[in-house]
């Protein structure tokens, strides 16, 4: 597979000057300020998965406009103290799936919350998360939903869902609120970066081959979807490029990344046809907190795969092993027993 973008040396030297909306911060402050009008509490219902070492809960969290967002909360069975937690966001077109599918972080001893992405899942016995907004004006996919206005754009709703899920999980009695890390691959990596910018006090963020970064460049050079959805839209609507690119700048994770301060571990693949490496490097270089990077020179969008999961396990262990604030009233009984 050939290089799809700039060389590694060029990407390391890259310092892009991105077009940032003057009201970017005010836009997100207004967006997130609307949620307290929807005070429905989160619900966590035990699920019988047949597993004995991991306890799973079907979560329903009020997200954008108070709409229910589903997720799975996994806890190591028998955990007795508030745990560090990994909150994970999913790749493009993926839902949370079945409750027993993703157990790595719980097996490593952490709480793990997996957020369903609105409109992208498939129905299970427990349900999925629909996107209730009208879909008119979009080409197939999600990137162009509501693309004529930042107020209507799909990722305004998704980023708000993510923020509300993190807030809900930080308030959960099984989780140490000072030890929450957000992560995701591709779309999930872009959501993780945005969440790190919009939620203060996170312990860390791990964006892998992140989508939604330097979108103006990405829609011009990416060879495969999802960025090509925006190019397809503009191929039909030739007079709307300025409007569309302006809307997408409000959800550009490379712009939001400069607001984030939590320690970060990035991964970038140099032969990525889906999320061009120069766009991922734009987010890395602009990131506002301490940061580390793993580059996979000969990989495409699969990135580091299991090798990178191993690096993440080590990074999270070292990150969360530092002493945090004492937690008063830690329970004597395991959390899964208390919450059942």
Image: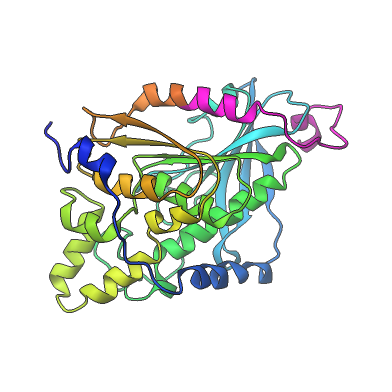
Q: Nearer the viewer, residue 270 or 93?
A: 270
User: Can I make out residue 170 in this image?
Assistant: yes
Magenta region includes residue 322: yes
Q: Position of residue 141 (x, y in %)?
A: 29, 58
Point 15% across, 48% down: residue: 223
- Where on the picture, by quarter, is residue 77? top right
Residue 62, compared with residue 84, is above or below; it is below
Residue 170, compared with residue 214, is above or below; it is above
Point 58% across, 58% down: residue: 68
Q: Nearer the viewer, residue 262 or 337?
A: 262
Q: Nearer the viewer, residue 85 or 64?
A: 85
- Where on the picture, by quarter, is residue 69? bottom right
Q: Is residue 300 left or right of residue 26?
A: left
Magenta-colored span = 312-340
User: Can I make out residue 145 in this image?
Assistant: no
Residue 267, compared with residue 147, is above or below; it is above
């Amino acid at each position: 597979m050939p290089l799809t973008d700039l060389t590694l040396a060029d990407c390391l030297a890259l310092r892009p000057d991105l077009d940032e909306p003057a009201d970017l911060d005010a836009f997100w402050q207004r967006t997130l300020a609307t949620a307290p009008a929807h005070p429905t509490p989160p619900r966590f219902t035990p699920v019988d998965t047949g597993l004995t070492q991991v306890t799973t809960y079907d979560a329903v969290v009020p997200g954008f406009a108070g709409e229910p967002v589903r997720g799975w909360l996994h806890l190591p069975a028998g955990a007795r103290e508030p745990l560090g937690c990994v909150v994970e966001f999913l790749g493009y077109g993926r839902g949370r799936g079945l409750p027993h599918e993703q157990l790595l972080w719980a097996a490593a001893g952490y709480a793990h919350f997996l957020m369903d992405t609105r409109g992208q899942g498939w129905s299970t016995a427990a349900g999925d998360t629909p996107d209730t907004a009208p879909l008119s004006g979009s080409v197939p996919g999600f990137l162009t939903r509501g693309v004529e206005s930042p107020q209507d754009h799909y990722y305004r709703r998704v980023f708000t869902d993510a923020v509300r899920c993190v807030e809900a999980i930080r308030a959960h009695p099984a989780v140490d609120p000072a030890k929450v890390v957000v992560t995701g691959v591709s779309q999930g990596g872009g959501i993780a970066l945005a969440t790190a910018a919009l939620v203060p006090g996170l312990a860390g963020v791990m964006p892998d081959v992140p989508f939604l970064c330097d979108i103006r460049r990405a829609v011009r050079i990416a060879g495969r979807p999802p960025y090509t959805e925006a190019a397809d839209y503009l191929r039909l609507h030739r007079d709307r490029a300025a409007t569309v690119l302006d809307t997408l700048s409000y959800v550009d994770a490379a712009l939001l990344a400069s607001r984030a301060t939590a320690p970060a571990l990035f991964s970038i693949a140099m032969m990525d046809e889906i999320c061009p490496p120069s766009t991922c490097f734009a987010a890395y270089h602009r990131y506002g907190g301490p940061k580390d990077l793993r580059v996979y020179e000969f990989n495409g969008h699969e990135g580091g795969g299991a090798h990178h999961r191993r690096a993440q396990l080590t990074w999270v262990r070292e990150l969360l092993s530092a002493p945090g604030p004492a937690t008063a009233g830690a329970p004597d009984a395991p959390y899964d027993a208390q919450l059942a």
